[in-house]
Image (cartoon, coloured by chain):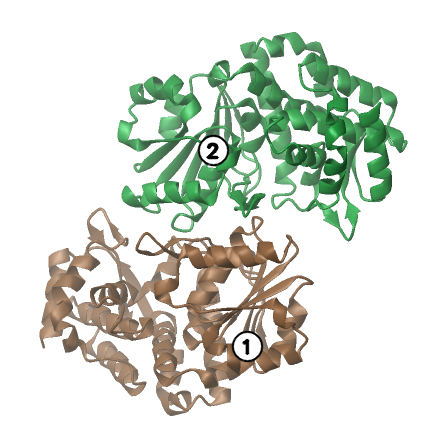
Chain colours: A brown, B green
Amino acid sequence: MYTISAAKAPNNYPIIVGTDLWSTLKDACSRQTLLVIDRNVYHYIVDSLLDNHFLLDQIYVLTVDENHKNLQVVIHILEELVTRRHDRSSCLVSIGGGVLNDLVGFAASIYQRGISWITMPTTLLAQVDAAIGGKTGCNFAGLKNQIGCFYQPKSVIIDLQVLAYLPDREYIAGLAEVVKYGVVKDTEFFAWLERNTQAILLRDKAVLQTMVQHCCTLKRSIVAEDVMDCGVRMILNFGHTFAHAIESATKFVHYLHGEAVSLGMLLASKIAVDVGMTTKNTFSRLLRLLDRFGLPVNIEVLLPFVDSICEILLTDKKVYDGKLVLVLPQSIGKVKVVDSLSPELIRDCIKNYVSL
Amino acid sequence: MYTISAAKAPNNYPIIVGTDLWSTLKDACSRQTLLVIDRNVYHYIVDSLLDNHFLLDQIYVLTVDENHKNLQVVIHILEELVTRRHDRSSCLVSIGGGVLNDLVGFAASIYQRGISWITMPTTLLAQVDAAIGGKTGCNFAGLKNQIGCFYQPKSVIIDLQVLAYLPDREYIAGLAEVVKYGVVKDTEFFAWLERNTQAILLRDKAVLQTMVQHCCTLKRSIVAEDVMDCGVRMILNFGHTFAHAIESATKFVHYLHGEAVSLGMLLASKIAVDVGMTTKNTFSRLLRLLDRFGLPVNIEVLLPFVDSICEILLTDKKVYDGKLVLVLPQSIGKVKVVDSLSPELIRDCIKNYVSL
């Protein structure tokens, strides 16, 4: 068990990474606690929870996915709190993936103007990304994460054992975010990933501990500099502007988020090569690592969607005054925020790459 | 025009008190601005707004009252923002009473995880109380202010001219909160109120400027010490625990909030006399001032509701471990938070007073 200790407020909560952390969870809870648990993990963990003195009636099981990441689910959670007469001293716990994390965190942030929230992310994606940084919320009026709060948990408790239950496809999708950290911020970590590909794919415990803990440390350090997401935090969008366009153009059914991020990072890197911002070597190292992890790299399958992707990109909320703000790699370990590329140039780069 | 300047973050926003502040409002707004206006004041101010270059399609008129202080109205405001494609740089303005302030502030706090919010309170109650302190929210599942956020406005702009349109009963109800500040924190201000009763009732402009500005300064200084309402801010509940019970027992139709606060302050003060915490003189000075302002002081009309009031009191959210936390006066200008009185004693005091 390793605790990533407190940064400055409002990020001064512990991130605990380890195994068998059920009693750690219990100790962090208050008298009135409601555990909201993703149905996907519920049956794997319910025995451990009840062994550790949580009561069955403290548990609320929820079926969630991106298509149900809406205000109605947040309202259900709030109603549970009211029914159980929870007061301001109570505590809400989320145990699940990124969607559940965001929904429960949002409910905690607005119940009686904010109660304690502890999050226990159970997917790799949530452990290395969604659960760190205090972004909570839900979709609204057809738009992703349109409402929500910046709200910090009381603690983030990451039990690596639950990763054993994660389907391969989901685990691998989470690795896209892991790779991202290497590209945007940490050359050595990227090299470590290259050296440990097999052990990572085998979910070796010691390797998972190092990997998750390192990603959390990186994300926290970036977030701490920019709590409200109006500056340096933007580098975390590497690959994501493209990923959102890909997900949207393919109606959110073809790709998991992490898979779209894999393709998005490739698009961003290819553009960086085309405009001379980085070398071909940066691009090919990234491509090779993603491929070895089993992430999608076959960009040509996007051909039927390329017009749609370009159109969505250029109406993205990251477009300011007609300029698309992109995060592009300069090298492995360093990215740059760029808003000087014309929409036509971006479109041409994408079309060329996809048509290769 | 007087600006109460910045306290420390997160309360470092200006509170501007004066007359004819429409251009001040306009200057504070951003490119994308939506003005949400209470229907009660809309027709009084619409000409001034349009004269100052706001456009008609930047205005959204809303009918609000305590019975419609619900999530559905917040959702309507959020939908307006989506429809108008407002982004994170946009600005939401509330022009109305306390209910509108709380609803619009809440919408601003959760739209795209928080956009700028400027509030222009138009009732005396909102000017001296609701608009200062960052409490936003709405009723939920039949409970008052059950969901919401602590969210600070970009600025509070208080135009005293709008008070001219306020019906007498509402204006007078607002004076209950004004009197409260004197009792909890400021002997001299209480004496100033006693000396200026007539001018205050006549809504003399200079007197209003002094009075409102002073209340805002007091409230801000208390709030700045306790942003999240878990300490000293509790003194602002003087009279309010009783007022909520009175409002609830009388089904929210007999009394305006300020009127219930008047009776609530009297109940609190009478208990303080009965338990020897303060002198009869404290009680009678308070009674006399409330009476001269035309606020309700005829406590005996509560007789039919007294059992109901006592029952609600003892299930209030300010009950911790079976103890009711009360704010009681020690003298004019000083209150104390007390949790040592038994429910039986409180009940007896109330019954005796009401039966007199």
User: Residue drawn 71% across and 45% down?
Assistant: B318
Instruction: Tell me if B72 is positioned left or right of B332 in this view.
Output: left
Residue B108 at what x, y percent from top left?
Answer: 43, 43
**Label 2 element class:** helix
**Does residue B99 appear in the picture of this structure?**
yes
User: Residue drawn 64% across and 52% down?
Assistant: A88
The local crowd at label 2, few if under 14, some if 14 to 19, many if 20 or more residues have their Cα within 10 Å, is many
User: Residue drawn 60% across and 17% down?
Assistant: B210
Q: Relative to the observer, which residue lies in front, B23 or A85?
A: A85
- The mark tally for this picture is 2
Indicate the chain on which mark 2 is placed.
B
Residue extending farthest front: B304
Quarter occupied by residue A170 = bottom left
Residue A98 at what x, y percent from top left?
Answer: 43, 68
| Of the two numbered discs 1 and 2 in the rendering, the one whose residue sits closer to the viewer | 2
Q: Are marks 1 and 2 in contact (CB under 8 Å)?
A: no
**Label 1 element class:** strand
Q: Relative to the observer, which residue lies in front, B196 or B321?
A: B321
- Give the residue type at disc 1: Val
**Does residue A160 appear in the picture of this structure?**
no
Residue A294, compared with residue B89, is above or below; it is below
Instruction: Tell me if A186 is positioned left or right of B156 in this view.
Output: left
The reply to whether label 1 and label 2 mark residues of one chain is no
Residue A122 at what x, y percent from top left?
Answer: 48, 75
**In the drawing, what numbered circle is on residue A17?**
1
Distance in Å between CA atoms under marks 1 and 2: 44 Å
Indicate the chain on which mark 1 is placed.
A
Quarter occupied by residue B265 = top right
Residue B300, compared with residue A354, is above or below; it is above
Instruction: Tell me if B52 is positioned left or right of B193 in this view.
Output: left
State the residue position of label 2.
Answer: B100
- Give the residue type at disc 2: Leu
